[in-house]
Image (cartoon, rainbow, N blue to C red):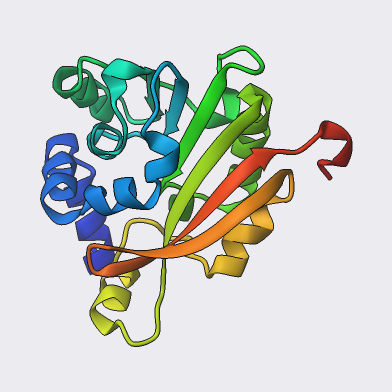
Amino acid sequence: MSIHGMISAFLAQPLIFHWQQKLCNNYGAVKEHFARYVDVSGKDVLDIGCSSGNCASALLPMGRNRYVGIDIVPGYIELARKRHPAGSFLCMDARELTFRDNSFDLITLIAVLHHMSDELINDCLKEVRRVLRADGIVLCAEPVFTKGRPLSNLLLTFDRGKYIRAREGYQSLFRGFDLSEVRYFDFSIHRCCSFILRRKALANAA
């Protein structure tokens, strides 16, 4: 088995992945970056690719909002339910969301898209657009390879996500949305690019 394969198999264990995230990832940086969007109350929030809930618990107050986290890995969902009782966690494929149209004010995809092919992302974003309210927003943040950061680039090479893109690569996937903001921020040793998306009228969502 390759080094990449061994790392992937190791982190596929929900409890190991939970503690790797908790100890190695500075989710406070994500919260600070998105502060004006996540310091909210009474909102319907959907977190796609929530894993064990570490990021969401640091990012926004679950108890003040109607938070739903989804992931396709049952073990992650089981662990999230135990550790974050203020939220609701469901095992679900984001390509087939079971929620009604216009259900959510805020949808987050934090470090999720680099695990997904373009085709898979396009299918998921169709569903995201369907369940997002007309005045809702989508928060995305993804790691990018960065000149002058050799350790970050090395670690990203061995990341389980096989689809790390440049900013333009991610941005090209958001044609069905209005892209209102693109920024960069530091996340642990990595540099991340963030995107703020708003729903585009269906007539214009080519």
The tally of labels here is 0
Q: Position of residue 96 (x, y in %)?
A: 58, 23
Q: Quadrant of the C terminus?
A: top right
Q: Quadrant of the N terminus?
A: bottom left
Q: Nearer the viewer, residue 120 or 137?
A: 137
Vertical arrangement, residue 44 with respect to residue 177, above or below: above
Vertical arrangement, residue 59 with respect to residue 116, above or below: above
Q: Nearer the viewer, residue 190 or 93?
A: 190
- Tell me what residue is drawn at x 38 percent, y 20 percent: 67
Q: Nearer the viewer, residue 38 or 10?
A: 38
Left or right: 93 as drawn, with respect to 27 = right
Q: Is residue 88 visible?
A: no
Vertical arrangement, residue 23 with respect to residue 167, above or below: above
Q: Residue furthest right?
A: 203
- Tell me what residue is drawn at x 56 percent, y 52 percent: 117
Q: Position of residue 114 (x, y in %)?
A: 45, 55
Q: Residue furthest bottom?
A: 148
Q: Is residue 7 visible?
A: yes
Q: Position of residue 17 (x, y in %)?
A: 18, 44
Vertical arrangement, residue 84 with respect to residue 182, above or below: above
Q: Position of residue 187 (x, y in %)?
A: 29, 61
- Tell me what residue is drawn at x 31 percent, y 45 percent: 31
Where residue 36 sits, quadrant-wise, is top left
- Tell me what residue is drawn at x 22 percent, y 37 percent: 54
Where residue 91 sits, quadrant-wise, is top left
Where residue 59 sits, quadrant-wise, is top left
